[in-house]
Image (cartoon, helix red, strand yellow):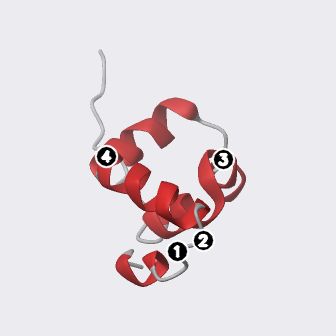
Amino acid sequence: MIESKPFDPAPSDFPFVFVKHGWRGVERFFGARTERNLRWFRECGRDRLNDLRRRYMRGELAVLDEVKV
C-alpha cells in the first residue's frame, strides 16, 4: 500500500534566503534535495523571487525589505 503524506510547506524564510544567497544558499540552508527545493521555489513565487534576486544582485539592497520573512 502506498501512503500519501502531506508535503512540508516552504520554510517562512525560504524567499529571503533565496534572494540574499541564491540557489546554492538554499541548498546549504535547507538541504540539497532539489525536488523539494524546487517545489518550495514554485510555492513561494518563482518569477517574483527571480526578479527580486536579480535586483538584489544589481545592488538594490532594499529588495530584502520586500521579501516576507
| Residue 54 placement (x, y as % from top left) | 50, 55
Give the residue number, with chain letter if any, for mark 1: 60
Give the residue number, with chain letter if any, for mark 3: 27
Secondary element under disc 4, as helix, strand or loop, is helix
Q: Residues within 10 Å of mark 3 (few under 14, many from 20)?
A: some
Does the residue at mark 3 contact the one at mark 2 (Cβ under 8 Å)?
no
Disc 3/disc 4 C-alpha distance (Å):
19 Å
The residue that appears at 72% across and 53% down in the rendered structure is 28
Give the residue number, with chain letter if any, for mark 4: 47
**The N terminus: image quadrant:** top left
Does the residue at mark 1 contact the one at mark 2 (Cβ under 8 Å)?
yes
Secondary element under disc 2, as helix, strand or loop, is loop
The residue that appears at 42% across and 49% down in the rendered structure is 50
Disc 1/disc 3 C-alpha distance (Å):
23 Å
Give the residue number, with chain letter if any, for mark 2: 59
**The C terminus: image quadrant:** bottom left
Q: Residues within 10 Å of mark 4 (few under 14, many from 20)?
A: few
What kind of residue is marked 3? Answer: Glu
Residue 17 is drawn in which quadrant? bottom right
The residue that appears at 36% across and 78% down in the rendered structure is 66
